[in-house]
Amino acid sequence: MPVISRGFHGRRSESEHKLPPGQYETHDFPVLSAGPTPRVPVDTWRFKVRTESGTLHEWSWADFLALPTEKPRVDLHCVTKWSKFDTRWTGVSLDLLLADVETSAEYALVHSYGGYTTNLPLEDLLDGKAWIVHQFEGEELDPEHGGPARLLVPHLYLWKSAKWVRGIDMLVDDEPGFWESAGYHEYGDPWREQRYQGD
Ligand SMILES: Nc1nc2c(c(=O)[nH]1)N[C@H]1C(S)=C(S)[C@@H](COP(=O)(O)O)O[C@H]1N2
Ligand SMILES: [Mo]
C-alpha cells in the first residue's frame, strides 16, 4: 500500500476533489446501452409504480409534464471509470412521484422499456436524491441517453440511472437487476468504489 498519495505533494484542483476513487474526468457524454435504443412515443409512454400489495400508480406523459419540475445539477460517475461534472437536468423528483404511494417495502426494482432493470434501496430514491428527468442541458433528452425520460440517481454509479424508465416495483425482498445479476455491486456507491460484488 502506498503511504503517500499523489495529492499530498501539491494542491488538488477543484475537480480532483469531485472525483471518486479510480475515476477520471471526461467532457464527453458517452452512451452506454446494453442493447438497442428503444423508441418510445410519448403518446403511449406510461410510468407505473407498483407496490408490494399490487396497488398501481400510473402517469401518462401529459400527467408527468403537468408536475412541478426541479433542475438538478449533478456529477455523474460511470463504473467504466468516467465521471462527468456539473450536468444539468430537468425532471420530477421521486419524492413527489412517490408521495401518495403507500408502502412498507424497503427495495425498489426499476424497469425500463427494452427490458433493462436495476435495483436499489427505496430510501435511495427519496429525500431529494433521485428524479425522473426528461431534459438534459435545456433540451429534450436524446433517445440514446434515455429519452423520453430516464431515472437519475447521481449518488450511485450511473448504471442505476435507468434509461427509458417505465416503472418501479416496490419489493419487500431485494431482487438483483440486469447488471447486479451479472456481478456488479448491489449498491454501487462510487465513493466507496463498490463496482463489483464483494467490493
Ligand atoms: N435502460 C437502460 N438504462 C441504462 C443502461 C442500459 O443499458 N439500459 N445502461 C446504464 C449504464 S451502465 C450507464 S453507465 C448509463 C449510461 O447513460 P448514458 O448512455 O446516458 O451515458 O445508463 C445506465 N442506464
Ligand atoms: Mo455504466
Image (tube, rainbow, N blue to C red):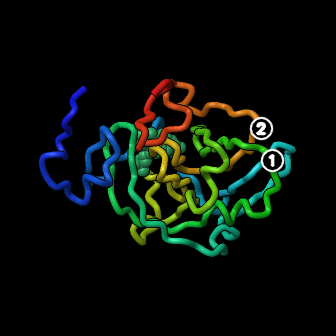
| Amino acid type shown at disc 2 | Val
Q: In terms of sequence position, does the residue under pointer 1 or pointer 2 come before the other?
A: 1
Along the line of sight, the residue nearer the viewer: 101 or 128: 128
Which residue is denoted by mark 2 in the rendering? 172
Location of residue 104 in the rendering, given as x and y in whole percent from the top left corner: 81, 47
Quadrant for residue 85, please give it.
bottom left
Q: Residue at x 66, y 67 (%)?
A: 64
Few, some or many residues within 10 Å of mark 2 (<14, 14–19, 20+)? some
Q: Is residue 151 left or right of residue 45?
A: left
Quadrant for residue 157, please give it.
top left
Disc 1 + disc 2, Cβ < 8 Å: yes
Query: Is 6 placed above or below 151 here?
Result: above
The local secondary structure at tag 1 comes to loop
Could you say which disc has been placed on residue 153 in the image?
Answer: none
Location of residue 19 in the rendering, given as x and y in whole percent from the top left corner: 31, 49
The local secondary structure at tag 2 comes to loop
Residue 36 in view here:
no
Q: Quadrant of the N terminus?
A: top left
Query: Is 150 placed above or below 67 here?
Result: above
Along the line of sight, the residue nearer the viewer: 120 or 162: 120
Q: Quadrant of the C terminus?
A: top left
Query: Is 90 placed above or below 193 here?
Result: below
Query: Is 89 placed above or below 84 here?
Result: below
Q: Residue at x 29, y 54 (%)?
A: 17
Residue 125 in view here:
yes
Location of residue 190 in the rendering, given as x and y in whole percent from the top left corner: 42, 42
Q: Residue at x 61, y 64 (%)?
A: 93
Which residue is denoted by mark 1 in the rendering? 104
| Amino acid type shown at disc 1 | Ser
For label 1, being within 8 Å of ligand 1 is answered no
* Extreme residue in the left direction: 9
Location of residue 23 in the rendering, given as x and y in whole percent from the top left corner: 30, 42
